Amino acid sequence: MPKLTVTNLTPPGVTPAYLLADICIQDPFPAEGRLVLQIPAGATKSIVLEMGQLQRIKPLLVAAQQAGGIQWSVEATDEDPRAEEADLMGGPVIDVVDTGTTPITAGAANIGSVATGSGLLMGMVQSIRRLFDPATPLADYLDIQAIDPGIAGDDIGVVLINDAAVVDPSNIEYAETLPTPAGYSRVLEIHVLPATFTWVTLATILNDGVNGIVPRTALFLAGSFRLQSGANAGAVNNPTDQALGSLAGGEGVPLMLNIGDTPAVITQLTDVLCRFDVDLTGSTMLAHDSFIARLRSSGGGPSALFGGGLA
């Protein structure tokens, strides 16, 4: 039977008393018996429940987490190792970890490691915005996506500017609009030297491990924008300026990846590819050790496991 742990994120020592309230999770169809989990502000509670109960209350848990009210997880008890429904047909599968070109090395900061498979988004949806040439929108475009699924990406804004003042050797520069405009959590300005990129080559450099969005915005005040470039087309024309607009359509919760005992940073994610960095300089794993890696939803639920060996 799965064990559910829920934390009420309302801080009791900071929140005004009139806003303090218990969070209550209740099974909407108590077929196995009444289930009510009441968590006071700042408290954590755990309960062992039936799989059917977990499946029915999971939408409530995800909605409460997306609203910032709770943090929750599911783990196996000694009685039942199937708590997270891993390895069910149609679930996420990792087929290959590419260690031939980007080996995962013990005691090192590994950059650009790759895992491929199917269903890696686990039904989650990343926020997205399409940038396009209004004269030829079906031919000249690229998609900017949030790496992490979920609604948080809907508040990120993007501006594309053809800027003759760009001096970076990569012909692309990034800036954060400060103060942040109303209605956005963050706004990224992408400045490109005019007539330097096509839509396709711009999409390629946005994903680049050196000059792309993730590495070049990692030192911004609030950290990386966690953005990637998605599908793209139009190899002839140069990108046109794009006014401020937000990403949209995110659903679900972010995904997490652990390599053995160490959390990894996902730098590119599609349904069939997960590119990641993992710093093993402080890990207890040694060269030639075997490891188990796990890609899972931060809200519990399905997960994908794969094994490998460290260089």
Image: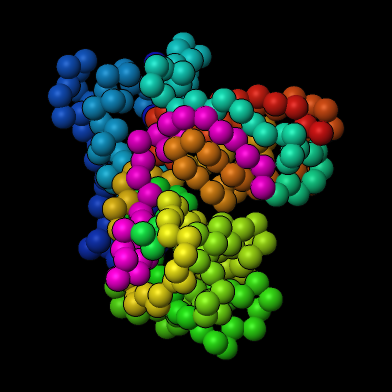
Q: Is residue 21 above or below residue 308?
A: below
Please tell me whether residue 34 is drawn above or below residue 274 in the rendered image.
above
Instruction: Please provide the residue range marked out in magenta.
Output: 112-138
Based on the picture, tell me whether residue 115 belongs to the magenta stretch: yes
Q: Dividing the picture into quarters, in which one does residue 102 lie? A: top right
Q: Where residue 125 sits in the image (x, y, percent)?
A: 35, 45
Q: Residue furthest right?
A: 287
Does residue 70 appear in the picture of this structure? no
Q: 26 or 281: nearer the eye?
A: 281
Residue 254: x, y in percent? Answer: 43, 46
Place of residue 10 in the rendered image (x, y in percent of width and height, measured from the top left) = 35, 55
Compare residues 49 and 271 and report the one nearer the observer.
271
Depth check: 26 or 208 in front? 208
The stretch drawn in magenta includes residue 257: no
Residue at x 35% of width, y 69% of height: 133
From the top left corner, tell me how far across and down residue 101 is, in percent.
74, 39
- Which of the pair 91/159 is nearer the observer? 159
Outermost residue to the front: 236
